[in-house]
Image (cartoon, rainbow, N blue to C red):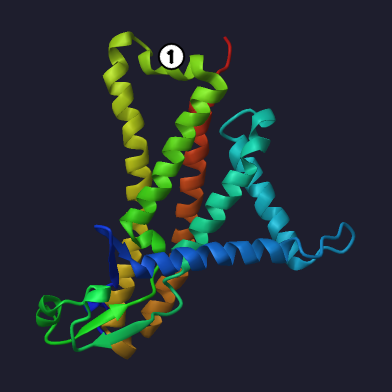
């Protein structure tokens, strides 16, 4: 299977190009997190908690400590739900492309999913369309997450501490305003690119290993194990940077 030759199904709606594999993966990631959360709280018990409840309690405590490391403890509680949502969704999304792939082979054009005659000619008369991947391996998905964080950060800054929020654009001197604006605009860019680049690079390497056939199976197992670690680290980094940005916009310590 030459995964490097894969195309992705693209649906054109109103001038927008929608990658169906990413769209499907986003829905699956959201459902997986929802189901995991519901299972964890289905039979809550103080005296005899289930393994799932213990895991979720550990995850909540971990996120709480992560948020509390970026802002005063009194303010951290309000952002635990946001932190849990981000870290769980991104972690699941990062791993979604690891277990298997769903590929269909096309020998005739199918404009509905973006398989054109030109694409067929480029791929020797047939094209393999991949319907399954990690959604965070798509720059539009990571950019969307980063823009949500960007909008939320500045909304909270204006709503909760507008004086401090507006003042920081002119610090340490008023003529630093352009540089501070550029710094703020660079935050969502780096958030999106860091997550995308790490997950996309991992999937490209998996595709390369798959092209090696049977010889690459041991290497594939090792790399997939390492990819779980990378996926966890990237989910953590995205979450803690989000909290750092929110803290910078909303928390002001009086001196």
In the rendered view, tell whether residue 98 sits above or below residue 57. below
Residue 245 visible within the image: no
* Closer to the camera in the image, 51 or 29: 29
Residue 110 visible within the image: yes
* Closer to the camera in the image, 45 or 25: 25
Residue in the picture at 12% in, 80% down: 117
In the rendered view, tell whether residue 10 sits above or below residue 242. below
**Residue at the farthest front position:** 14
Q: How many marks?
A: 1
Q: Secondary structure at mark 1?
A: helix
Mark 1 Cα shell of 10 Å, populated few (<14), some (14-19), many (≥20): few
Quarter placement of the N terminus: bottom left
Which residue in the protein does label 1 denote?
167
Q: Position of residue 94 (x, y in %)?
A: 45, 62
The image quadrant that residue 149 belongs to is top left
Residue in the picture at 42% in, 37% down: 150
Residue in the picture at 47% in, 40% down: 241
Taking the image as shown, residue 24 lies to the left or right of residue 15, namely: right
Quarter placement of the C terminus: top right
The image quadrant that residue 120 belongs to is bottom left
Q: Position of residue 42 (x, y in %)?
A: 77, 64
Q: Position of residue 247 (x, y in %)?
A: 53, 29
Taking the image as shown, residue 74 lies to the left or right of residue 214, namely: right
Q: Position of residue 101 (x, y in %)?
A: 39, 80
């Amino acid at each position: 299977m030459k995964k490097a030759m894969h195309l992705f199904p693209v649906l054109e709606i109103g001038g927008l190009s929608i990658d169906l594999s990413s769209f499907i993966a986003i829905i699956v990631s959201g459902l997986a997190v929802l189901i995991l959360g519901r299972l964890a709280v289905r039979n809550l018990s103080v005296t005899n908690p289930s393994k799932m409840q213990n895991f979720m309690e550990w995850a909540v405590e971990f996120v709480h400590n992560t948020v509390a490391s970026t802002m005063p403890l009194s303010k951290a509680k309000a952002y635990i739900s946001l932190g849990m949502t981000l870290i769980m969704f991104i972690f699941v999304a990062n791993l979604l492309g690891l277990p298997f792939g769903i590929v269909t082979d096309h020998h005739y054009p199918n404009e509905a999913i973006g398989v054109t005659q030109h694409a067929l000619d480029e791929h020797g008369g047939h094209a393999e369309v991949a319907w399954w991947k990690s959604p965070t391996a798509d720059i539009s998905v990571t950019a969307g997450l980063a823009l949500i964080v960007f909008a939320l950060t500045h909304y909270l800054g204006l709503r909760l501490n507008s004086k401090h929020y507006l003042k920081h654009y002119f610090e340490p001197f008023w003529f630093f305003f352009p540089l501070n604006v550029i710094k703020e605009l660079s935050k969502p860019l780096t958030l999106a690119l860091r997550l995308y680049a790490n997950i996309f690079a991992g999937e490209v390497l998996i595709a390369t290993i798959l092209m090696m056939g049977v010889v690459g199976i041991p290497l594939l197992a090792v790399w997939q194990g390492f990819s779980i670690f990378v996926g966890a680290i990237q989910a953590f980094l995205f979450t803690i940077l989000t909290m750092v940005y929110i803290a910078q916009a909303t928390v002001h310590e009086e001196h």
